[in-house]
Image (spheres, rainbow, N blue to C red):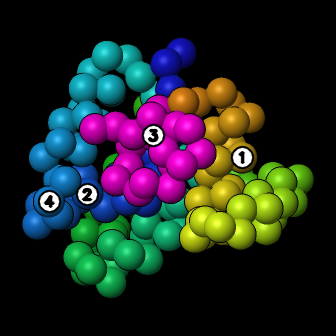
Amino acid sequence: MKRAFADTAGWMACADAADPAHKPCAAARDAWLEQGGVLVTTDYIVDETLTLMRLRLGHAAAESWWRQVDGSSRIRWEQITPARAEKARSLFFRYDDKDFSFTDCTSFVVMRELRVREVLTTDHHFTQMGFTLKP
């Protein structure tokens, strides 16, 4: 199964037509899914995305996105367990020269664990950790 990670910045770019990365992100997402790929995300990313969508695009947009993501067999949700959170804390404090968010670090942990190298995002932090951005 071919997997890519979906980060908050990627979900937001896909949802917001005013985002400069909207077209390339939506095209990358659609191409990935059309090729039979699965998008992996986490409960932390879903939390962050729902909150940002509601604030930036409104309640209806957040609810619509939730229905699409929650009901899709092409999206795999990973939970940030206590063990994953501990690994993320280690990364968060190890890289004091970076401005990674804690959520970024949880994503890095999941991606490494699942051996996922590609990520749907516009967030440069993922390239700093050696992942490949899509688009």
Residue hosting label 4: 20
Residue type for callout 3: Val
Location of mark 2 (residue): 13
Residue at image x 68%, y 43%?
110
Using the numbered discs, state the Cα–Cα distance from disc 1 to disc 2 in whole angstroms.
23 Å
Judging from the image, what secondary structure is the residue with disc 4 in?
A: loop
On the image, numbered disc 3 is attached to which residue?
A: 119
Label 1: how many residues lie within 10 Å, few (<14), some (14-19) or many (20+)?
A: many
Q: Quadrant of residue 53?
A: bottom left
Q: Does label 2 or label 4 sit earlier along the sequence?
A: 2
Residue 46 lies, in percent from the top left, at 51, 61
Q: Amino acid at mark 2?
A: Ala
47 up-or-down from 133: above or below: below
Q: Which residue is mark 1?
A: 109
Can residue 46 be seen here? The reply is yes
Task: Tell me what residue is drawn at x 50 percent, y 70 percent.
Answer: 48
Q: Earlier in the sequence, mark 4 or mark 1?
A: 4
Q: How busy is the neighbourhood of tag 4: few (under 14 within 10 Å), some, or many (20 plus)?
A: few
Asked whether disc 1 touches disc 2, contact meaning CB atoms under 8 Å apart, the reply is no
Earlier in the chain: of badge 2 and badge 3, it is 2
- Mark 4 vs 1: CB contact within 8 A: no
Give the answer, above or below, for where 47 lies relative to 36: below
Inter-mark Cα distance, 2 to 4: 8 Å
Magenta part of the protein: which range? 118-135
Residue 70 in view in this figure:
no
Q: Is residue 44 left or right of residue 20?
A: right
